[in-house]
Amino acid sequence: MVFQYPMITVQACLDGLLLGILFALIAYGMALQWGVMNIINIAQGDLVILGGYIAYFMYLYGIHPAWGVIVSPIIMYFIGVGIYKLVINKVVDRDLFISILATFGISILFMQLMNFAFGADVVLANSGYGTTMLFNNNVTLPNSKIFSAFVSIVFAICLVIYMKKSKLGRAIRATAQNARAAKILGVDTEKVYAATFGINAALCGVAGALISITFTIHPYMGLPYTIRSFMIVIVAGLGNLPGVAMSGMGLGVFEEFADYILGTEFRIGSVFLLLVLILVYRRFKLSRKREYLK
Amino acid sequence: MKINKLILSFISAVAILLSTSVVSFAKVVGDKIVLGAAISLTGKYSSNGVHTQNGYNMAVDRINSMGGVKVGGKTYKFEIIYYDDESNPKRAAQLAERLISQDGVEFMLGPYSSGLTKAIAPVTEKYGVPMVEANGASRSLFTKGYKYLFAVLAPANLYLDVAIDLAVEKNNGKPVTVAMAFEQDAFSQDVRLGVLDAIKRTGSKKVIDDKLPKELNDMAATLVKVKQMKPDVLVVSGHTKGALTAIRQIAEMKVDVPMLAMTHCDAAKLSKQHGKNSQYALCASQWHKTLTYKDDFFKNGMKYAADFEKEFGYDPPYQSAESSAALLVFKDAFERANSFDKKKVRDALAATNMQTFYGNIKFAPGGQNVDKPMVLFQVMCDGSGKCENKVVAPTKWASAKLIHPVPKWSER
């Protein structure tokens, strides 16, 4: 079919790239916190969905959901810091297994709370952006997807500059490199950890708002986003933003093609399969040395 | 530390005491007929679970206030014990056991969804407890030879085959090409089987047959294929998320297809919340308020909808209407059986032949309702952008004429 209808190939590539940029944003948040405090956040996807609900509620109250990409990260930052203070700082010095369990617990809690608070309905926020037609209307790109890719890139660039230039950004990078040395040199690592978790949650907030504009959200839809970002990170490695962006887009295109060739039912399945293959191939070691200091 | 432990053991002692000393209900207490139901009040089915519960409650209040149930010269009132099954089939089966063996319930109402009904049916069957259910449409429920299961709704395979027939009719009786996208769950796959039957019957051709995953929120790939292959009909079924995703992406990608047929449009509130994007979509429904069926309790569909809105503040989806109908069926069966013997009530249920505001009800040996056709409505919008669902098929109940083929996006 891909050969029979060449336009499908073009469409799949473009859809995949736009989608992949969004995945990369979520994955970048995960890479950041994984690199700094060596925590694999299973609740990543649920933070995304929560961010989506914030945009959705703005939409319900008559505010254009695109503002969600500003409001949602601000709220999510504080939620992230709150989660850190309540849970993560109690498990951050334990082994990896404990932190995975803890974030897994947070994930379940968030799912149920969102279900309780917002109901089990599938919702979406209408942006009212039109559609861009290419190649004699054979390829269509919803402007909402273009918008979300654009916003993702803007946020990623801002974050990179922030990490390079600002004091907190330097502190975060220093802590990621060597927490002990950073602490000796006067970095308040506790604050850095909290801020990192907050920034990650804020990125999830942006992504969630974009997903509510582009796709649909539902309390139980978080896990696929966690898996995707996990995969992007282990392919790209920690602290490698171009790598994250590339592997994010690669995953997006891979998913679209899997959808066309194997069928929609294998879309998520193929992502899981790819994850297993990559883990086997890279013999990924999860037993990285912990660098947390109390 | 010691005090903490003491408090903890005290609390657990109280908890154990409370859990064992629950008052045991019997099937009929004084002038009350106690029915049991496991309903999804939390979890992924919670919104439809609540619609179901509201439907049950509405009918219980109405029947009780209009004289109750007369059995053996005495009047009884309905009462329902609810448990929350958390949208979890295992939990639903446990709760059914609990309702029957601990609470002594001898008559059950169904849960929400085919999956949960499938989990409960073996339990009610084991104890010989009659269950009237209103929200499990999967065909497989009715092929297992269950004797105590009765469903007031039409089975899932009848949801969308009407649409194929309609498309063929509009094509001057010539076969059509069909694109299908169905979620991989019991209900949607049954809908798919029905559509396949219709395709075979009419000599039509399927050109796309996609299965959608449970985590579905993007069906761009399917829609691109639709765009390239230009089928005559696109059929989508994947609960609320399928309906929402399809409507959003069809509008965004400007997919032109002469006929779009779906399920769960009213649960997804398409016409209210997605207006023009959902215009011309055809939707299968068990019930619509404009149908002119009648009964003594709710009068007719319009009256039911008005009363329901007054009590719960929203327009009743068909899930509520069919749940209310289940109570009417029970009342009718009790009075005809004139007894509370499970076997006799079961036989009376099997012989049901009545009309309710929701439709005619007559059970096949498998337990499904064979006397009520599905209806198709079409989302139609007026100039101001206000959209409404109008019944277009079957012609007997139609309140508007089908708009076919759907105008192209470039001409809207």
Image (cartoon, grey):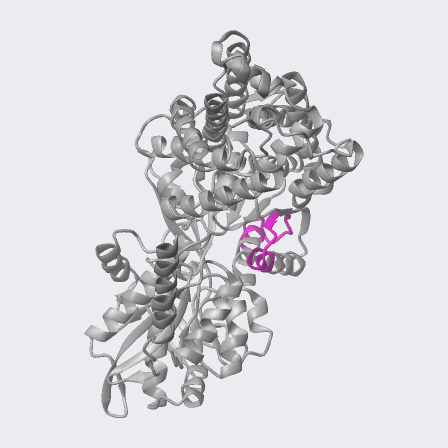
Q: Is residue B186 magenta?
A: yes
The correct choice, above or below, for B331 with respect to A214 in the image is below
Report if residue A4 is visible in the image: yes
Whether residue B406 is visible to the viewer of this picture, yes or no, is no
Which residue appears at 40% of the width and 21% of the height?
A70
Horizontal side of B224 relative to B253 (left or right) equals right
Q: How many marks overall? A: 0
Is residue A14 positioned above or below B72 on the image? above
Identify which residue is drawn at 55% across, 64% down. Answer: B138
x and y percentages locating residue A46 in the rendered image? 49, 38
Q: Quadrant of the N terminus of chain A?
A: top right
Q: Which residues are magenta?
A: B166-191
Please check the rendered image and state whether residue B48 is part of the magenta-colored stretch, yes or no: no
Residue positioned 42% across, 87% down in the render = B342
**Along the viewing direction, whichever of A98 and B23 lies nearer the viewer:** A98
Position of residue B350 in the picture relative to residue A39 (left or right): left
What percent of the width, then of the height, locates residue B151?
46, 71
- The residue nearer to you, when weighing A168 against B76, is A168
Residue in the image at 34% along x and 90% along y? B339
Q: In the image, residue B116 lies at what x, y percent? A: 50, 64
Report x, y in % for residue B311.
Answer: 23, 57
Give the image quarter of residue B208: top right
Q: Residue furthest top?
A: A165
Q: Please tell me which residue lies in front, B46 or A136.
A: B46
Front-lying residue, A136 or A9: A9
Instruction: Identify the residue at the far right of this view.
Output: A281
Q: Is residue B162 above or below residue B224?
A: below
* Residue B15 in which image quadrant: bottom left
